[in-house]
Amino acid sequence: MAAIGGNLPMPAPANAYTPLSDPIVVIGEQFVAPYPVDLKIQQRVFTLAENNCDITDVDGNLIFKAKGKLFSFRDRRLLLDAAGHPLVSLKQKILTVHRRWQVYRGESNNSNDLLFSVKKSSFLQLKTTLNVFLASNTNESQPDFIVKGSWYESGCTIYAGENIIAQMRRKHSVQTMVFDTDNYGLTAYPNVDYAFVVALVVVLDEINADRNGDH
């Protein structure tokens, strides 16, 4: 049907993105922006403090830090803000088939502080697919979010239903080769809690490392 004035409406560009009408807030409203948030993740392969990595903005300013628990069990990690305050505690649930991780507010492990849990969608996978369940989704009949891909597949995509809410891509440089680091670019789409996205990527790292015998 012709538009007013007889002109047909122009189609939207193929790469156009429509921000979510309802913001996705899981860890905190302060981590939701009305524009895409681009972050860099740098993980040192060899380090005394296991699996530590820095998450910065594109200018190199520290935004988050993921830390392993040195001299502790390997089934716990912390996501800290730039000032070193714990945002969430990530813990692996022992003796589960699908490698379930549970994420709690702060340093808590109390069920009242559970924010979400993540598990592999199936025991045997050629490509990594993780199902993410918010704490309110107690029956877990359908995941609230899905993560597809892995560090070893050069990146991942995070979905809410059919909507892409974040993407991670591996980046190579001379510096990363010389200093033995893995460097990734992470984009959280508008109105998406980017701290939540980073926490998902940290869990993905743990599940992939476990699958490949690093844990």
Image (cartoon, rainbow, N blue to C red):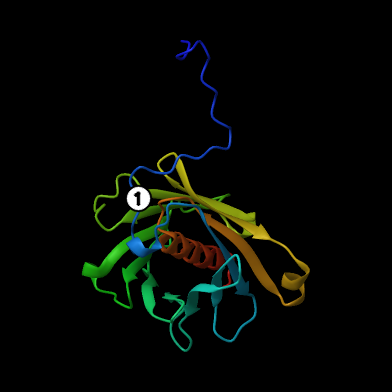
The reply to whether residue 67 is in sight is yes
Callout 1 environment at 10 Å: few (<14), some (14 to 19), or many (20+)?
A: some
- Please name whichever residue, 49 or 215, is drawn nearer the observer in this view of the structure: 49
Q: At 43% from the left edge and 52% from the top edge, which residue is drawn?
A: 34
Where residue 62 sits in the image (x, y, percent)? 53, 74
Task: Work out which residue is located at the far front of the displayed protein and give it.
Answer: 5
Where residue 48 sits in the image (x, y, percent)? 58, 87
Q: Is residue 38 left or right of residue 95?
A: right
- Please name whichever residue, 56 or 131, is drawn nearer the observer in this view of the structure: 56
The reply to whether residue 148 is in sight is no
Residue 186 figure quarter: bottom right
**Residue ID for mark 1:** 23
Identity, as a three-letter code, of the amino acid under mark 1 = Pro
Q: At 38% from the left edge and 78% from the top edge, which residue is drawn?
A: 86
Where residue 110 sits in the image (x, y, percent)? 24, 73
Q: At 32% from the left edge and 69% from the top edge, which residue is drawn?
A: 104
Task: Work out which residue is located at the far bottom of the displayed protein and give it.
Answer: 71
